[in-house]
Structure formats: C-alpha cells, structure tokens
Amino acid sequence: MSRWGKKKSYDNIHNYVERVEDVLLSESSWSTSDSDCSGCLHMSQADSLQTDPNYAVGLELATLSPTQTLDNSDAWNIHGNANYLRSAGSHCLLAGGLKTSADPTGGLSSRGLRCSPSLGGTDTLTGGGMLQQLALLAAGAQPWHHNICTAHGRRFAYAATLAIYVYEVEEGSSDWQLFSILANHRKTITCLDWHPTNEDLLASASLDQRVCVWSVSSQSVLCTISICRVPTVVAWCVGHRDLLSFSTQIGPVQLWSYANNSEPYQYFEDYGYSSPIITYRWHPTVPGRLVVGHDDGKITVYREDSGKSRYSAFPEGAEDNEDHSLVTLEWDTCSPDYILIAYRGGSLWLVDINTMMIITKYVMPISASVNTLAWLPDAPGMFVTGDSEKGILRVWTVSKPTPIENIVLKDTGFHVLCTTRALNAACPSSDKQNQMIERSSERKGIMIPNVCVLSLFKDGGVGLYHLRRKQWIFNREHGHTETIFDCSFKPEDSDLLATGSFDGSIKIWKIDTMEAVDTLPNRDTIIYSLSWAPADLNCIVAGTSGGEVFIWDVGKHKILQDIISHKDKKVFCVAWNHKDSRRIASAGESGYCYVHQVSGTLVHDYRHPGPVYGCDWRDADILATGCEDGKIRIFNVTKNRKEPVSELKAHLKKVFRVKWNPVYEDILCSGSDDSSVRIWSYSKAQCLTILVGHSDNVRGLAWCPEVPYLLISGSWDRTMRVWDC
C-alpha cells in the first residue's frame, strides 16, 4: 500500500484545466522597495477530483503546454509573486496582489483562466477545470500620491500601489463592474491620466521612473519610456491626439509623442524651478495654456497664445500668517484666465492668472481644510471640495464665499476626487425618488447638476457619488492599500477570511459578498503573519515587523495581549495551537521560536542559528520550524529540553514555510529559497519526495483538507503549482 494509504476516488484530477482564460496576478515581497503587490486578493474554488493513472505528478497552471515544462507538469501562471496560500474546505486563497485579465469582450471572466496577451501565451490546456475564480477583491486606493484617479464616460480608474483598477458600467445598467486591471509598474504608481477623447488610452507613471501608455481594453502597455528621475505628473496635451506631457518634481515639463516613439523634449527652455512641482494642469479648452503649482505656493503660467510667454508669482492679496503650501489647483473650465487654488492652511482662492490677483477668498469652517477639489461639468461656476480630516463634500459657486451645501459622506478624510457626467441609467434609485430629491433641491434654490463625484478616501475606500440624487451609485469600503502578507480562514466558519497587510491593518472579509465585516485599524507596523484561535474563540494572533505579537479579540474589538519577547526584531510567522488553545508559537528575525501561553507567559524559547521564517503545530505538543540555515527542526514542547527531537537537513537555502499534513500526521512539507518543495516523514526523519518545478523562492504552501495528498505551492516565479504528493 502507498505510504499515503488508500486514495479515495475523486473526479478528473488528470483533466485539470479546461481552459486558460484569465490571468491571475499575484505580486508581493517582503519589502516595499521592490514589492509587486497592490494589496488585492483572489479567491478560487476547487471542483471535484478523481485519480487517474495518466495525470501529471506536478500540475502547474501556466501558459506553457505540458511538453514545455521541465517536470512534466501543466502550468498556471499567476504573473506575480505568490506570498501565502491558505485553504478552507473547497476554497483556496492566495495572498499578495492578485489581478485578473479581461476577456476579449472587455469583461472580467469569473470562470476558468486565460493567458496574458502581453506575455504571448496562447496555448490552452484541455480537460475538466479544477480551479475556478470566485471573486477578486480589488486593492484600496493608495493614500500617498494625489493624481491617481480619473474618469471618462462609462469608466473610471484609480491607482492602488502597483495596479490601476478600471471600472465600467454597461449602457442601460446601474451595476459598475471591474473591467480591467493594468499592472506593469514595478514600484508605486505616482500618477495617471485618461486621454480626453479616447477612452481606451490611459497614461501612468511610477517610482520605477517609467511613463506608460496603456490600452485599457487589452490591458497591455502600448508604449513606455524610462527617464532619469521619478515622474510625479502625467497629462495629455489638449488639442494633440498623441502628445503626452510629464514632469518630475524639479521639472521641466516634457512632451512626448508616444505614437512615434520619439524622444521627449522640453515644453519651454526652462532651467529648473526654485520650488518643487506639486502638480500642473493644461487648460481643458485653450491649447498650449499651462499652469504649474509649486510647493512654496507660487504658480507658473505658460501661454502659447501670446507668443510663448512664461511668468511665475505668488497670488497677491494673501495674509502673511497663512500656510501657503500648495495642495492642488484646477482651471475654471469656463474661463481661460481663472484658476482655483487650495493651500495646506485651509486657504481656497479663485485667482486671475493675468494679474495674479485673488478674485475671491472662500471661507472654510474653522479647523477644516481642502485636500482635493474639482469643477462640475455642465455647471458653469460650480465646484466641489473634499475635506482633509473628514469625508465632507462641499458644493460651492464662484459667486458665494461659503459653500451652498455640505454633505457628510464618511468619517475618514478625502484623499482625492474628480468629477464626471452622470449617465442616465447609472443610478439604481426609482424615478419617483429621484424626482422628489430634485424637487427638494429646486425648492432650496439650488440647481445641482447631473454629476457624479469619484471619491477616494484616506482609508483606501472608493466610491462614485451622484451629487444631484444624494446617493452612492458605487461604494466599496476600503480594501488593503499595501502588500498582503498573510491570510487565514476562520476554522469554524470558512466564509470568514482574515488578511494582514503592510498597511498595518487586519481585515476580516465575508467571502460570499467580499465585504469587510471588521477591521483592526493601522497599528503603525507591518502585519507579517496571523493565525485564528481554534474552536469558538473569536480571536486572532498576529506577528509584526516591530517584534510585537498581539492577540486581537475580534468580537470585543480590543487587544487582549501584547507579547514583546522578540523585542524589536521582525516576527515572520505565528501559529495558534488548535489542539491546545493555550499555546501560541511565534518565529522571527531574532533567531528564536517562542512558545507562549495566551496569558503572555513564556513557556519555551527555542534558539536557532539564524532567523526563523516558518513554524507550524502538528498537534498539542509537536512543533516544526524552518530556519535560515536550510534546516527543519521539530520540537516536543512537553519535554524539558531546548534541543529539537529531530533535525532535518532540508534545503540548500533557507526554509521559508513548513506545513503539517492535516490528515496524515506523519507528513510534513517545506518550501525554500532553493526553489524546491520537499515532503518529509517525521517518524523516519527522511525526505520522501522532492518536488522540482519552481524557478524562484517558494513562499506559499497549502494542503488540501479534502484531498490530503494534494498540495499547492506558490512562488516568486509567479506560478502556483498543484502537486500530487
């Protein structure tokens, strides 16, 4: 009999992938400097399986044909760095920035997998599909850079850390759907802009010092250029179909005819600015007219209509005691000469660029300040602002120094907003309700235009608010804004999933709706690992980059215990013992694996010769660890000894993850930076199988609880592999 015992009969394990239709992108790492994650999650579900003597031993889902893989396996290429895998029943989840390609018709497929045209993959794998996409949880909007949202007709887009998410509503529908995910930048996206006349063209720039022009529908980069500094603003030039501008903080503004793939050139022969550029705007109707806003509050104006002139000044009429650090500015769409400027100290001015005089000073409430603003289309002289500290949307007219309406949308402050014309069928409310709202506005003497406000909040939340009807037509509460390092299903409820992120928060998601049902706010540290308590204990233990291990009572929404044995050293892995709920293991950079009681009492401290990256409980007493030296150590916590009861010379490089099989207690798997996955017998202290196929660091490991010999591994080679062990 096989060492695994007699296998049960499952359906179609050899007919593994019916079609490769969607590409799943998972990109994350242990540092933000080269992190490839924008903080989104992908959920998949396994169909029924059946053994067959002809199926491949290692199944890797990718764009290669079966004969192209070195290990005789089929492949699923996720085009990103798989960081962590978890399973619960028939669900499997991969954490670390998963993204999906749109199908040829422009929608996102939730069934099957498709190759990425940008990588040239076109082969399909025949047979019954085993993994199907259930849902994609998009990352939240990043909170760092301002020029990261834009809208065009039936579409709007915003930037997370490393991906741009594009949503679309079909004509006659009110349901906004994720249409496209644009992911090619290797570092944080700094800005984006939609082409004014072509809804398929979108430009972006990033800390990777590249400017990209995208085809939104095909999710491909049409053209890219690298520059010597980080571009902070990109903007299409009005009146020129293929001309794109960009600038770094120190300038100058450069023009690039991307269609000709020509070299960029300076807009003016400038020799730099005395203060960094915060933003700039081309006039939407006057070609060649440009205004640049600087950190010191000055604005620089360029005019081609008067013989290519440039002048720079601070608006006259300001008070000396005000904070004049510029936040943002926008042209008045109905005037060639007026701009609206917001400053850090709360000042909001309408300025005439010809005289550099302040025309109107708008009055904000005490302690309130503007973080973002936009003019309303089809409403001359009307604009909106978003408060910095609270999600208050204020509606203004140029003729009145105080807002005509204040709308509280959220407790969290605005990060950035933009406006777009509302589509007739884009709101789910009834016609009768809409008419009542509109009549109410008319009675107040306010004629609010038919406009939607795309709102990005500081907590990562994204929403589309119908200004006239006073309601959200799209509203998604905050997702993670940074790399997701760990995820874990609740043991007693596989519909609840916890995620921990570089953004310092833990979120709990309801899988059937993919909505956040609870959040532990930012703890000013990185959440590297988390683990649910067993049984009905509604608690989570987490390990952080600051060396802290803490227990969060989800139900009471409070921290029950802080454990600081690791001091200031990173905690890479935590594991709550599910056979003895009093014990928690934590492993980290200090070279120790600690075992604590939930009360915080230290039970054992197991010293290793280097950082410990993984730990996992087999039962109440047996604990396995994976170390920098490439060894697996197994400890019995009931024995009064600090030496391991077994030591396995496991890998050529560090062991990053160890996982006990949930059914066969003698079986342990390990993943390493030597790119291999190994299967071990604890009782024999020997390696049973070496699974070779990955070409980079192995990070995620998950046994299937329903098919105990099925193992899924995720790697920085951007693939997930499914193995019959």
Image: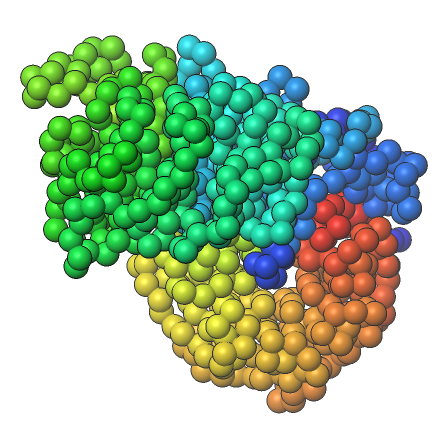
Between residue 675 and residue 246, name the one nearer to us.
246
User: Which residue is found at the position 13% from the left and 42% from the top?
Assistant: 363
Q: 28 left or right of 13? A: left
Q: 164 left or right of 713? A: left
Q: Position of residue 42 (x, y in %)?
A: 58, 40
Q: Is residue 684 visible?
A: yes
- Picture layout, residue 339 above or below residue 589: above
Q: Position of residue 696 (x, y in %)?
A: 77, 56
Which residue is situated farthest in the front direction here?
Answer: 307
Q: Is residue 108 visible?
A: no
Between residue 565 and residue 394, name the one nearer to us.
394
Q: 352 left or right of 591? A: left
Q: Position of residue 571 (x, y in %)?
A: 55, 71
Between residue 342 and residue 703, name the one nearer to us.
342
User: Which residue is found at the position 72% from the left and 32% from the top?
Assistant: 118
Q: Position of residue 483 (x, y in %)?
A: 54, 53
User: Which residue is found at the position 12% from the left and 51% from the top?
Assistant: 366
